[in-house]
Image (spheres, rainbow, N blue to C red):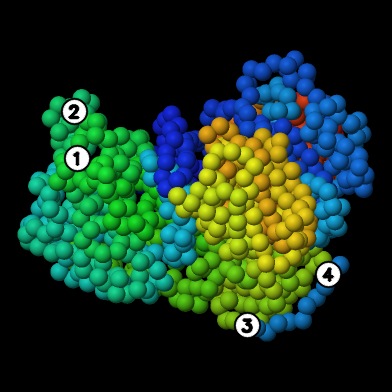
Amino acid sequence: MALGHSSRVCEAIEEGDQPSRPPQAPRPQHSGGFLKCKKPCVSVEEGRGTPGTPSTLRYIQCLNHATRVRLDGLSSSRKESRHRARQRHHPCSLIHPMYQFAAGHWSEALTGLSHCLSRTAPPPCPQSPIPGGVRTNEQDTTVPESISRRSVLAGMAAMTVAATVGSAALATPAYAATAPTPLPLLPLRIPQVDLALEQQPDSKIQWLMDAKLGMFIHWGPYAGPAKGEWWMHNGPVTPENYRKYVTDATSEQFTADAYDPAAWAQLAKDFGAKYTTLTTRHHDGFALWPLNHPNAWSSGQAPLSRDFVKDYVAAVRAAGLKVGLYYSPIDWRYPGYYDVTGTNCATNPWGYTTDPAHKENARIMKTEVYESVKELVTQYGVIDDLWWDGGWIAEQGSDADGAFFWEPGQFRDTANQWPVDATYGETDASGKPLGLMGMVRKHQPDIVATSRSGWKGDYDSDEGPSVPSGAIRTGRLVEKVFTVGSTWGYNSNGSVMSYGTAMNILVNCWIRNMTAMVNVGPDRHGTVPSGQASLLRQIGTFMTACGQSVYGTRGGPWNPVDGQYGFTYKDNTFYAHLLPGYSGTTFTTPSIGDAQVTRVFDVRSGAGLTYSVAGDGRVTVNGIDRTTHPQDSVVGITLDRSVQPADIAAGKTATADSEETSKGNTAAKALDGSTATRWCANDGQTGHWLKVDLGSTRSLTGTRIAWELDKTNYRYKVEGSTDNSTWTLLSDNTATTSTSQVQTVAFQAQARYVRVTVTGLPSSVYASIRNLEVYDRPFTADLGTYKIINRNSGKALDVEGASTADGAQLLQWPYGGGTNQQWTLLPNTDGSYRLVNVKSGKLLQSPDSTQGSILTQGTDTGSDNQWWKLVPSTTNGYYRLVNARTGWCADVAGGSTADRTNIIQWPITGVAWQDWQIVSL
């Protein structure tokens, strides 16, 4: 591995952060009819860094069950004057129709809505905000910016929850405020374009999402000295002397005389792995196949004269496992790796110094990489996973920082200073030179790859033995990799991770929607150490007994509680994984929404368990076996319907008034369940519509739309009809300023046909929808991700120490972009919200009934001490966070502007330090 054995800053994706990429000017990219914009990712230390510039909300309109959120994608300057802000309308026009609806004053609420739409003077402000039986089932045996209303609560990035209009507006809600909390929708993963190459769609990464467990194999000449895969670097050992581990007959010679890849594959199956990955070449530059390059050092040379990769691929494929190949472009044999320009040699263990000849040396190294990759993807049949490692240059910066040299994307630049000879590179059909991933996809169109070549990758990598914590990883796939030995390559010290430690890492991956690949390091003969093999087989015993709660599941639908429990689910069943930190033989789940329980069982034994369901939809399970397998006691709960509300439009008949048929962007593509395809109109005009026929009249609860482009203002309306003739307006977003790519609209209506009409577009943008989803069950969807900034101090609401623990306190700190300073908003049916910390997955809460108590975070319990009302401040663009139980608001203790000052609960007094700006990220 490139990490963990040097001083390099880890590039692993952990705790929801994104990989760093140097700023680049956005540039349009076109592929298969898609017009996309590549933009840089930004990585910052948790909770620290430079404040960003927010985009802004135009207004929020809450209408009892249905909630309207109006959006504004415009940025505002941090220097905008308070005088300018106060010239805008009073903020009460943004919120208070919510109270009128809650009180049953429908006409007054709609009048308030029309004032918002027309920007006329608002109705009078309300004086105060509206404050916000168990049944037993028989046992079943089976900065503050001073801004206008245009610049507050911007974007509500994932969602526009719209008010219903017309006849549907007066329909009785399908669920009331006292009903069970609906189940959440799974956030969408939308493939992104980087370096002119789009990530693989869900259909091509699903096998990895389903696999949940893989086996990594680090094996090479470093197994001879038995001090780990970084021994050449850490020794250090010169390239000349390092070669002797292959050529010289000593007790440290890499002989591979017991190499049996079929035995490795069997171990992987015993372990419960669904795929394996072999290091075909590590940083020492030794290739495990007969590489055809003038400067190659490989197993095809004497004394080995073998193709280990060929035998490995054949054995793994014969075992029914997916085939993964690891490849590192780094090569310590080349001084040019540390001095690619020949002008500034980086510090290195071998004493290489600056030399102009190093530039050509680096170019030759690059040509070897291209030839290596070409051979790996053309000589061994289908390869399922390419595990890049080490795109960084001179062990400095990030993998993406090295992209200028390796050219890992779709194409190479003919003007690049380190050109690849035609002998080693490849071109596309038009003769354009391909980059590394362009070449890979040419020959392996279905392959998935990591991000560690410098290209974004199809999935993220989280390396090392740290136990995952915090919230579920959603909207992306994350693979955890760790080794059960003291090093990734064979080490003679014989150290092996304990079963409890390994299981703790694995289970905490699965309940967070991650897959995991566990590494072993065979010795110089090719034998996996007995201690490592024994551990893997012990884990395999668990997988045999409880695999149904792992394979093919997704993490959730609720966030885990660190150290105590978490959930996975598949189809109609969800699984509660009770960790060693959870005590007791009784467990209560979050609300199961509109579903009914049909069975509760111990997953290991299959025995039924007694349970009861409370009026709020929470299920209490009794008599759980915590002794047989305390590392993960798994309980299965089967419902009468799917755990996730299902998209009832998927696969139904779609029509549109205009289609870009020349590029295959037909109406049906918006209903095929893939976010990688789309419907697109044939021109850039407005008024184009997309319609779905559900087959029969249904009771609908809302839609979710994934537009083609992010950061783009699509204006639209949603209509419903029972006869395809008379249409009822379900959601009017013809004046929205939202630039969110995914928008969710909640409503109550009876309809067979649902139609989305695009009424407004930016210049040069076509009406284009990736996914149109329709739902007939109650659901929740977060309103996007936000930073919450205090008006007095200009500092952000922050979880102390970036903790993921229950009870962690809240404080203020300069905004730095860390996920511990980011919050998602989940709407409640009474118009209040749950504020969920992105890092921990925990809710902002009032800890008790004591005035002045410090606010904390806690696991969602459904209690109103975790519900908050966004009450407009008298200062335009700001809100007070008012707790639904206590009636007190979030207050900076003592009105301090100092870092680390705690956030307390205090009666509303109207001071600046009780005002918060909620800014979309």
Q: Amino acid at mark 3?
A: Ala
- Mark 3 near mark 1, Cβ–Cβ under 8 Å? no
Distance between the alpha carbons at the discs numbered 3 and 1: 63 Å
Q: Please state the horizontal and vertical placement of residue 855, each as a whole percent of the image.
A: 73, 41
User: How far apart, in angstroms, are the residues tagged by discs 2 and 3?
Assistant: 69 Å
Pointer 4 or 3: first along the chain: 4
Of residue 183 and residue 425, the one placed in the foreground of this image is: 425
Circle on res. 134: 4
Q: Earlier in the sequence, mark 2 or mark 3?
A: 2
- Which residue is pictured at 73% across the width and 24% down the height? 148
In the picture provided, is 691 more to the left or to the right than 591? left
How many angstroms separate mark 2 from mark 1 (CA)? 18 Å
Mark 1 nearby-residue class (10 Å; few <14, some 14–19, many ≥20): many
Q: Are marks 1 and 4 in contact (CB under 8 Å)?
A: no
Mark 2 or 1: in front is 1
Name the residue carrying label 1.
Answer: 420
Label 4: which secondary element: strand
Res. 342 mark: 2
Which amino acid does the dot numbered 1 rest on? Val
- Residue 787's x, y, as percent? 64, 35
Residue located beneath label 3 in the image: 607
Question: Residue at position x 23%, y 58% from top?
Answer: 378
User: Which is more foreground, mark 2 or mark 3?
Assistant: 2
Q: Position of residue 728 (x, y in %)?
A: 78, 52
3D distance between C-alphas at marks 1 and 4: 71 Å
Question: Who comes first in sequence, dot 4 or dot 2?
Answer: 4
Question: What residue type is disc 2 on?
Answer: Gly
